[in-house]
Amino acid sequence: MFKHVESKPGPQIAWSIRQMGVYQTYNTSTRTSSSLLIQTSAAVQKRVFELAQNGDISQLPNHWKNLHEIYLGTLSNNWSDYIKFLDEEISEIVSNAKYSARFN
């Protein structure tokens, strides 16, 4: 289970923390693997789509770690923007609290 951040359209809540499930089995004797990805991030979907468009998708099952590299490589996407958003929201709350304290 991995957590990632996705932006959301709309003015209410701009971000959501989501979970992605990953399950993989690997047969050492046949050197084959089966994977199941649940609720993948938009970045993972985009990367897999790019591989399919380039014809490189056939290379994905050649090594058990290839799929892991894709989703682990995308987990940090959006976190810096999310933290910046939180910082701005907290700064606004603190600013409003200081303003209110002056007039009370």
Image (cartoon, rainbow, N blue to C red):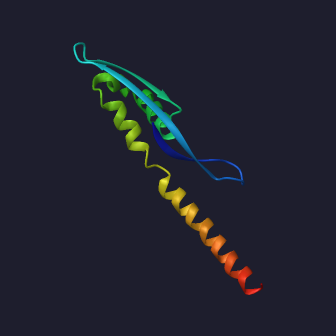
What residue sits 49% from the left and 36% below the top? 20
Answer above or below: position of 47 versus 60: below
Residue 96 at x, y = what percent? Answer: 70, 75
Q: Residue furthest left?
A: 29
What residue sits 41% from the left and 26% below the top? 23
Quarter of the image that includes the C terminus? bottom right
What residue sits 43% from the left and 30% below the top? 22
Q: Residue furthest front?
A: 104
Residue 60 at x, y = what percent? Answer: 34, 26
Q: Out of 21 and 50, give the one closest to the viewer.
A: 21
Is residue 41 visible in the rendered image? The answer is no
Q: Is residue 101 left or right of residue 85?
A: right
Q: Out of 46 and 9, give the one closest to the viewer.
A: 9
Quarter of the image that includes the N terminus? top left
Answer above or below: position of 34 versus 13: above
Residue 79 at x, y = what percent? Answer: 48, 53
Q: Residue furthest right?
A: 104
